[in-house]
Image (tube, rainbow, N blue to C red):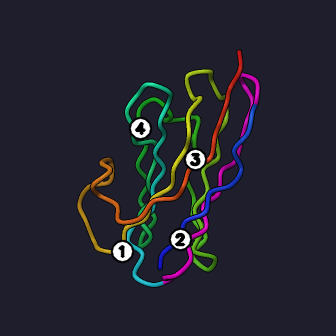
Amino acid sequence: QVQLVESGGGSVQAGGSLRLSCAASGRTFSTDAMGWFRQAPGKEREFVAAIRWSGGSLYYADSVKGRFTISRDNVKNTVHLQMNSLKPEDTAVYYCAVRYYSGLYFRGEDDYDYWGQGTQVAVSS
């Protein structure tokens, strides 16, 4: 049984930083990619960032490019999301996701196999 556990969410003022982490357990082999999505109140879940496990290719939504950095720890099967220069519009529940089979795309919910429960990020102005 694959489990993803997010941590690191919280409340911060605009301009501040937070670091999210997501630890995967239950399967530690053949990870192809992990990603972060977010869902703000009243909005659909949207892609934030993704990282390919082999090679480390990075993918970002335009709205976070230059402010957020995704990274991985292969040994701990963990992915991180460093969020700097946070804005009120970054307020959302952040979810991590993983897929175990090679794919071409990274920005859709259907591109991933398992999801975490989410962690809340609140940015005040």
Front tag of 2 and 1: 2
46 vs 4: above or below: above
Give the numbered dot on residue 69: 3
Alpha carbons under labels 2 and 1: distance apart? 13 Å
Disc 3 residue type?
Thr
Q: Amino acid at mark 2?
A: Gln
Among the two numbered marks 2 and 1 on one chain, the one whose residue lies closer to the N terminus? 2
Mark 4, residues whose alpha carbon is within 10 Å: few (<14), some, or many (≥20)?
A: some
Query: Sequence-wise, which precedes: disc 1 or disc 3?
Result: 3
Q: Are marks 2 and 1 in contact (CB under 8 Å)?
A: no
Looking at marks 3 and 4 on the same chain, the residue that comes earlier in the sequence is marked by: 4
Which residue is identified by label 2? 3
**CA distance separating discs 3 and 4:** 11 Å
**The magenta segment:** 12-28
> In terms of depth relative to the viewer, which is nearer, 12 or 1?
1
Q: CA distance from mark 1 to mark 4?
A: 22 Å
Q: Nearer the viewer, residue 56 or 32?
A: 32
Residue that badge 4 annotates? 61
In the image, which is nearer the foreground, mark 2 or mark 4? Answer: 2
Q: Earlier in the sequence, mark 1 or mark 4?
A: 4
Q: CA distance from mark 2 to mark 4?
A: 25 Å
Q: Is residue 5 above or below residue 3?
A: above
Q: Extreme left residue here?
A: 104
Q: Dot 2, how many residues are within 10 Å of its Cα: few (below 14), some (14-19), or many (20+)?
A: some
What whole-number distance in Å separates the C-alpha atoms at marks 3 and 2? 23 Å
Image quadrant occupied by the C terminus: top right
Query: 10 Å neighbourhood of mark 1: few (<14), some, or many (≥20)?
Result: some
With 31 as the anchor, is 91 left or right in this view? right
Residue 57 position in % (x across, y down): 41, 59
Q: Nearer the viewer, mark 1 or mark 4?
A: 1
Q: Earlier in the sequence, mark 2 or mark 4?
A: 2
